[in-house]
Image: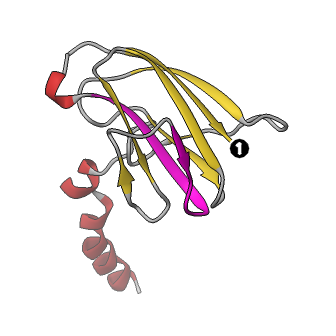
Amino acid sequence: MKRVMAILSIMLAPLAEPSPAAAYWTCTPGGWICPTEITMLRGTNAITIAGKTSPGPDCCAYAFRARAGQTLSWTLEGAKSLTVTMTQPDGHVEGPDLPREILLPQHGIYVIRVQPDLTELEDRPEPFSLSISIR
């Protein structure tokens, strides 16, 4: 029995170390892989998020639940070089020329992202205020 356990521990040892692929896909809170979940207080249909972008594309993603037929309205205040995109529950991405009011076509989790325009990327964080309402 000890021999079997020793063989298993030798065979499983490489699995204990993270692979380079796992390190690549680690979760940055608020990034596009791990968006920040936002919920509105009971009885309200709007929320305002204050944030700062970070250099690079992995920044400022917010997830929310909505039903098909609801309307999303949003406004963004901050640097003119910021863009907004939205990923639908089926993975379809809209933007960066996202309309300010959108009829949501699906039930599920949507992700809205604020990011620097990569053609005008600055190395400094850009503050912003994103207001979202769902009715």
Mark 1 neighbour class, 10 Å CA radius: few under 14, some 14 to 19, many 20 or more: few
Is 23 situated left or right of 93 in this image?
left
Could you tell me which quadrant the N terminus lies in? Answer: bottom left
Foreground: 6 or 98? 98
Residue 107 magenta-highlighted = yes
From what the image shows, is residue 9 above or below residue 17? below
Which residue extends farthest right? Answer: 43
x and y, in percent, of residue 110 in the image:
52, 51
Foreground: 50 or 19? 50
Residue 19 seen anywhere in this rendered image of the structure: no
x and y, in percent, of residue 132 in the image:
59, 33
Range covered by the magenta-colored residues: 101-116
Could you tell me which quadrant the C terminus lies in? Answer: top right
Q: Main secondary structure of the magenta part?
A: strand
Q: Amino acid at mark 1?
A: Arg
Which quarter of the picture shows residue 59? top left
